[in-house]
Amino acid sequence: MELQIIWLPALFMIALLYSSVGHGGASGYLAILVLAGYGRPDITPVVLILNIAVAATGLFHYIRAGHFSVKLLKPLIITSMPAAFVGGMIPLNDRMYSALLGFTLLIAALRFLFVARIFQVRETSTVVSAQTRILPIGAVLGLLAGMVGVGGGIFLSPLLLFLGWADAKKTAAISAAFIVLNSLSGLSAHLMQGAVIDWTLLSSIAVTIYIGGFIGSFMGAWRLSLRALQQLLGSVLAIAGFKLIIRIW
């Protein structure tokens, strides 16, 4: 099956907008490819590879801009990476997968639609040490990420902002690293279960997505906010999430 060219602009915009806040875009890519007619087993490894590439580019930009915090990342990945591996090993039927992905997209939509305001309020927040709470949070987020086939940044970043554990830029940097590591863990689980990488699909969309991710992460780390565009993306993701959830009924 070949991806129709009409989907490429959507994938480009998703990569650009997600990466502007340190995300890899996996949930958006999954939504587009599922709606384009691809089956879940065929696209999960491809999406995770693209997620790693885009999030790693974002991490590079945010580290260069001085926003990365190892102190907060370490306790999160201690539990999230093993949990993401376990989540990637859990078989889901199409109904449950569509429900999880749909709700994940709705969470992402809320994050883009409403959390931008919190960025402005909490940019001067200081990072706090709360490992007794961070460890179980990392495990839960990693498990969800592995099950859905994403890196978990869409769950993590709103939480960091709401709790005041990091400002907007640090949240983006930490989320990017969190996504890279959990995506690697989840991808390993899928490959161990016999998943096959669709190289044709990967090669047909990789350049488009990577360019979008590079531009978005650069703008997010160094330039002005993309709040208006993020809100537009939030609306699109909300529609896609509702559509996926409606399909299971």
Image (spheres, rainbow, N blue to C red):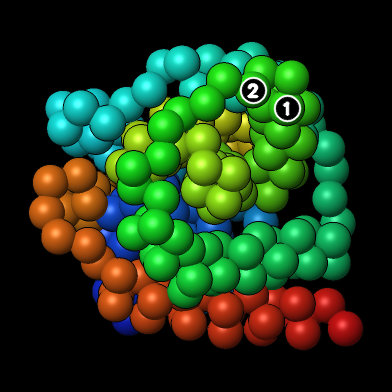
Mark 1 crowdedness (10 Å alpha carbons): few <14, some 14-19, many ≥20: few
In which quarter of the view is residue 79 placed? top right
Q: Would you identify the image quadrant in which residue 227 lies?
A: bottom left
Taking the spot 72% from the left edge, 33% from the top edge, the residue there is 137
Residue 246 image point, x, y percent: 77, 84
Along the line of sight, which residue is nearer the eye, 239 or 1?
239
Residue on which disc 2 sits: 130
In percent of the image, x 16 and y 32: which residue is there? 65
Is residue 178 placed above or below 145 in the rendered structure? above
Q: Is residue 6 left or right of residue 184?
A: left
Amino acid type, label 1: Arg
The label shown at residue 237 is none
Tell me the number on the disc at residue 133. Answer: 1
Depicted 22 relative to depicted 81: above or below: below
Please report contact status of discs 1 and 2: CB closer than 8 Å, yes or no: yes
Judged from the image, the secondary structure of the residue bearing numbered disc 2 is loop
